[in-house]
Amino acid sequence: MRRLVGLLLRFGLGPMLARRKRGLTRFLMRSPEIGQARTRIAVKAHDANGEVSASRYFTGGDQADVTAAMILATIRRVHASVPVPGATSISDHSLAQALDDLRALLPGMSIEAWSTAGQGPSS
């Protein structure tokens, strides 16, 4: 739906959509759900010349589910990795550990993550 609205906006139909927002909203609320909710995160590092030097991507299911699972996974990981009272930082944990924990907590959710180092996506 986001892509359809984006396409309509590119064709200059934004004012028409704004004038008919109530009718369009009623129509969309009555129509069947299209696809599932997805969470997408993209992080890109730029070098001094403004070129993308590396990037990381993540796609998962509904944002609320991903957020709740990551909070639980973080609590479990920190509790398990600190044998004596103290604090840890994000650098004490790896992305691979976080993804493994997330996949374990949400086994039915399709979760993808990939990184690039300026040469395109790789798994």
Image (tube, rainbow, N blue to C red):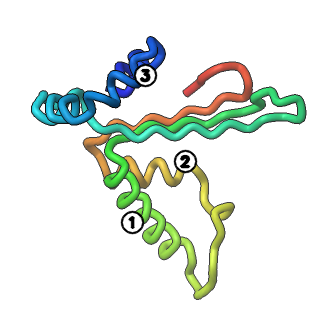
Quadrant in the picture for the C terminus: top right
Q: Residue at x 38, y 52 (%)?
A: 66
Q: Residue at x 68, y 36 (%)?
A: 44
Residue 114 occupies which quadrant of the picture?
A: top right
Element at label 3: helix
Residue type at mark 1?
Leu
| Mark 2 / mark 3, whichever is N-terminal | 3
Q: Residue at x 39, y 24 (%)?
A: 15
Residue type at mark 3?
Gly
Give neighbour class at mark 3: few <14, some 14-19, many 20+ (Cα, 10 Å).
Answer: few
Give neighbour class at mark 2: few <14, some 14-19, many 20+ (Cα, 10 Å).
Answer: few
Circle nearer the viewer, 1 or 2: 1
> Mark number for residue 96?
2
Residue 16 image position (x, y, % from top left):
34, 22
Residue type at mark 2?
Ala
Front one among 76 and 83: 76
Q: Residue at x 34, y 36 (%)?
A: 110
17 above or below 102? above
* Residue underneath mark 1: 72
Disc 1/disc 2 C-alpha distance (Å): 16 Å
Element at label 1: helix
